[in-house]
């Protein structure tokens, strides 16, 4: 029996929706694209950039993040890393990022290695920092995804300093990773790690309220709120401002 047009359309929509919701597949090695520093002088540093959920390597290249960073810090190589949703679902994102991207960069002798992530990539940056505290010279969070509403409400009601995260689990998984990321963030002010973390986001960002739970953990002058929403047109210029300040602060040390 020949299917009706309606049945065919519904089947096609189901396939499209399944594709949209699928995390995709990981590669044998994380795909990267290096944007070399425009300046051949000075100490070479590396900024690794993690994408938002909808970005691939070309999306990162088109975002303007690399030229924005390098306009502020001409000695910086920028490495765009295609750490897609599939790597998070795989459950080994921090380990793979370290083995395939960060450790090889360290071996190349950079004077500093920074990690920047937007939206989903902001959570990826926090996951890496939780896995290897202090490994990186610093973190730049661009409107990061910070967890579900229930957990954020819990932290916000008590305040980050007074918040009780509960017993530390033996391992980290999909059920525990958000709480464990926040447990690590809670330690930043006392350890001094806050001095190496920068945050930028749009004032009209849909995540702005959640981001407000994080800001008390950071120095006020390392938090930049700029006009706009949840998009690269906000994040890339803001990243340029952030890295200009970072470069200036390194020059005074």
Image: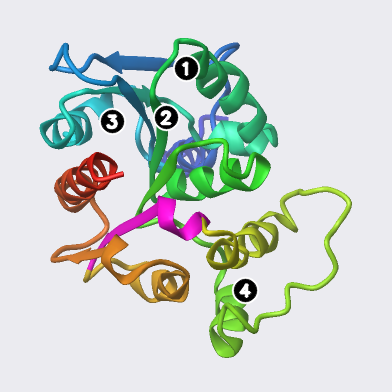
How far is the residue under mark 1 from the one under mark 2? 8 Å
Which residue is the extreme one toward the bottom? 157
Mark nearer the N terminus (3 vs 4) = 3
Q: What's the residue at 62%, 19% (across, down)?
A: 99
Between 179 and 70, the residue placed more toward the observer is: 70
Q: What's the residue at 59%, 31% (across, down)?
A: 87
Which residues are drawn in magenta? 193-202
How far is the residue under mark 4 from the one under mark 1? 35 Å
Q: Are marks 1 and 2 in contact (CB under 8 Å)?
A: yes
Look at the picture and state if 90 lies above or below 210: above
Does dot 4 land on a helix, a strand or a loop? helix
Disc assigned to residue 151: 4
Between 169 and 63, the residue placed more toward the observer is: 169
Residue at which label 3 appears: 60
Q: Quadrant of residue 36?
A: top left
How far is the residue under mark 3 from the one under mark 4? 30 Å
């Amino acid at each position: 029996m020949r299917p009706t047009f309606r049945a065919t359309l519904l089947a096609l929509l189901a396939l499209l929706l399944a594709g949209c919701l699928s995390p995709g597949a990981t590669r044998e090695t994380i795909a990267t694209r290096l944007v070399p520093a425009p300046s051949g002088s000075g100490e070479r540093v590396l900024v690794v950039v993690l994408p938002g959920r909808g970005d691939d390597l070309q999306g990162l290249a088109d975002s303007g993040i690399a030229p924005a960073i390098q306009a502020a810090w001409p000695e910086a190589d920028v490495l765009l890393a295609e750490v897609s949703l599939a790597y998070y679902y795989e459950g080994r994102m921090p380990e793979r990022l370290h083995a395939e991207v960060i450790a090889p960069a360290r071996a190349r002798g950079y004077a500093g290695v920074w990690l920047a992530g937007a939206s989903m990539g902001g959570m990826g940056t926090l996951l890496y920092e939780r896995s290897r505290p202090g490994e990186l010279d610093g973190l730049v969070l661009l409107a990061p995804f910070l967890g579900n509403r229930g957990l954020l409400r819990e932290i916000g009601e008590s305040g980050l300093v007074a918040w009780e995260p509960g017993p530390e689990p033996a391992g980290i998984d999909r059920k525990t990773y958000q709480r464990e990321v926040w447990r690590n963030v809670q330690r930043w002010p006392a350890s001094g790690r806050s001095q190496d973390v920068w945050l930028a986001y749009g004032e009209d960002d849909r995540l702005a309220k959640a981001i407000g739970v994080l800001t008390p953990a950071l120095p006020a002058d390392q938090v930049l709120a700029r006009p706009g929403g949840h998009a690269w047109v906000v994040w890339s210029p803001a990243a340029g401002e952030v890295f200009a300040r970072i470069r200036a602060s390194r020059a005074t040390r």
